Amino acid sequence: EPHAQGQGLGSAILRALVAEASGLPVHLEVLKQSPAARLYERVGFVRAAEQDYDWLYVLPALPETTRPMPALAERLKDVTVSPIVAMSSRARVLKAEGKDVISLAVGEPDFPTPPHAVEAAHQAALAGDTKYPAQDGGVPLKKAIQAKFKRENNLDYALDEICVCNGGKQVLMNALLATVSPGDEVLIPVPYWASYGEMVKLAGGTPTFVNCPQNNGFKLRPEDLEAAITPRTKMLMLNFPNNPTGAACSREEMQAIADVMLRHPDVWVLTDDMYEHLVFDGFGFCTIAEVEPRLKDRVITVNGVSKTYAMTGWRLGYAGGPKALIKAMVNMQGQVTSGVSTISQAAAVAALTGPQELVRERAEVYRARRDLVVELLNQAPGLTCAKPEGAFYVYPNVAGCLGKTTAGGRRIETDADFALALLEEKLVATVHGAAYGMSPYLRISYATDTASLREACARIRDFCGSLS
Ligand code: PMP
C-alpha cells in the first residue's frame, strides 16, 4: 500500500499489522521527505514508530523470484482483516519478546468451559458419537435449544425453525447469504462488531450505518432508525448487549425499535443475542421477537454457547427463525461445512440443559470487574468512561487525550495512535474505536482477572497522565 503517507504513522502501522496478520509478509519502506536524504531501510514497527519519519510506505515484501499469482476473487476486494486481530498479533509478538503485556483486546471469557460440558463431550467421543452430524443439528441439541428459547426468551420455535452452525459467526454469515442479494443494503447500528460489515460485503450486500452516539447511551433511537431505512434496506442487524459498548436495550427501547420495523414489512431483522446473559444490576434482557410477536416471522434470533458458557473454541452457534429461512441456511451450510462437530454438540446439550447457576455467578464476577474498571478508568486524565448495562466491554472516550504527545514522543491524533502508543509504551493491548466505526474511543475487554485489570488501568492512568 504505497500511499499511507499523510494519514498518520499510527494508522499506517496498523495497516501493516493487518497485512501481517493476514499472512502477507510486510516490508516497511521508510523514506525521508527530502529526496536527497532518501533512506531505504527495512524497519520493525517499533522502530518506525519511534523515529520521526516523514513518510511510511507499506509494501508487500515479495521475494524477487515470486511470480505474480493469478488474481483473487473480486468479492474480496473490499474485505479487510480485523484490526482486532492486528492488535492481538502485535501484542503476541511483544509477549514473545518477553515483555509483560496485558491484553484487554480479546472478546473471550477467561473462565473455563463448565466441567459437565467437557465431560459430556468426552463421553460422546468414547461412545462413538463420531460420525457425520445432522446438517441442521442433532435432535437432542435442537430440543435443548428449543427449551432454552422457551425458558429464557418465552419464544416458541418448532424444531424445523432451529438450526445449529459452526459458531455464532457462521449463523450470521448463513443468514446473510440466504437473504442478501447484490445491491441490497444491510443496516448496522454504529458502533458495531467489526465482522458485520465485512460479512455483508462477502454476501454481496452493502453495509449501511446508523449512528448510536454516546449521548443516546450508544442505543438505537427509533427516529434515527426510521431515517436510515431506504427502499433497498433488506435487513437490520441488532446487537444488544453490544460489542463494543456493552449497551443493552430496555423493553421500552426495544419496543420503539420494533414499532419502526412494523412499518417496514420487507425488511428482515437479525438479532445477535450473544451477550444475553451478561447484563448486570437486575437489568432485564429482552429480544425483539419476544417483545413484538408480530415481527417474529421475519426475525432471526441468533445466539450461541461461546460467551454464555465460555465455549468459544467449541464453535457452536444457533438460531431460531422462520422455517423457510432456516431451511435455506441449512441447505447452504450442508454444501459448505456440513453440520457442527458431534462432540461440540454433546457439550452444548450438557451446557444448555445442565445447572445454570454458573452463568449467573460468572455474570456477577463480570459486574464487579465492570464497576472496578469504570471507576479506575475515570481516574485517567483525559479519558471518560460510561458504565454500560452488559457484555464484558467498556468503551471509554479518549477525546481529551488527542493532540498530545506521549512520554516516548509519539503524537496522539487518533484513537488508533492512542491504542498503538499505549501498547508500545505501556504494554496494554486494547482496540481503537475506529475498528468499530466510532471514534475517538477504545474498546476494553474486562474478561480477565482483577489483578491484571488493576495493573492495566494503572498503566492507562500513567499513560494518560504523562501526555503533554
Ligand atoms: N457476535 C458478536 C457480537 C460477538 O462479539 C461474537 C464474538 N466475538 C460473535 C458474534 C461470534 O461468536 P462465536 O464465537 O459463536 O462465533
Image: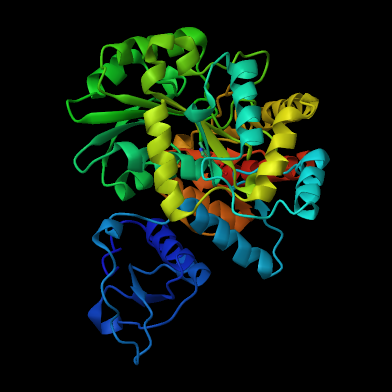
Q: Residue placed farthest to the top in the image?
A: 252
Horizontal side of 76 relative to 173 (left or right) equals left
Residue 361 % position (x, y): 78, 26
Residue 216 % position (x, y): 42, 18
Examine the rendered structure and indicate whether residue 259 appears above or below residue 186: above
Quadrant hosting residue 280: top right
Query: Which residue is at the front of the view, 442 or 125?
Result: 125
Quadrant hosting residue 63: bottom left
Horizontal side of 342 relative to 409 (left or right) equals right
Q: Is residue 255 visible?
A: yes
Quadrant hosting residue 306: top right
Examine the rendered structure and indicate whether residue 27 appears above or below residue 65: above
Residue drawn 70% across and 31% down?
Answer: 352
Query: Which residue is at the front of the view, 268 or 161?
Result: 161
Q: Quadrant of the N terminus?
A: bottom left
Q: How many marks?
A: 0
Residue 265 % position (x, y): 26, 17
Horizontal side of 83 relative to 422 (left or right) equals left
Query: Which residue is at the front of the view, 372 or 76?
Result: 76
Residue 463 % position (x, y): 60, 47
**How are the residues colored?**
rainbow
Query: Which residue is at the front of the view, 323 or 370?
Result: 323
Examine the rendered structure and indicate whether residue 226 appears above or below residue 238: above
Q: Is residue 242 visible?
A: no
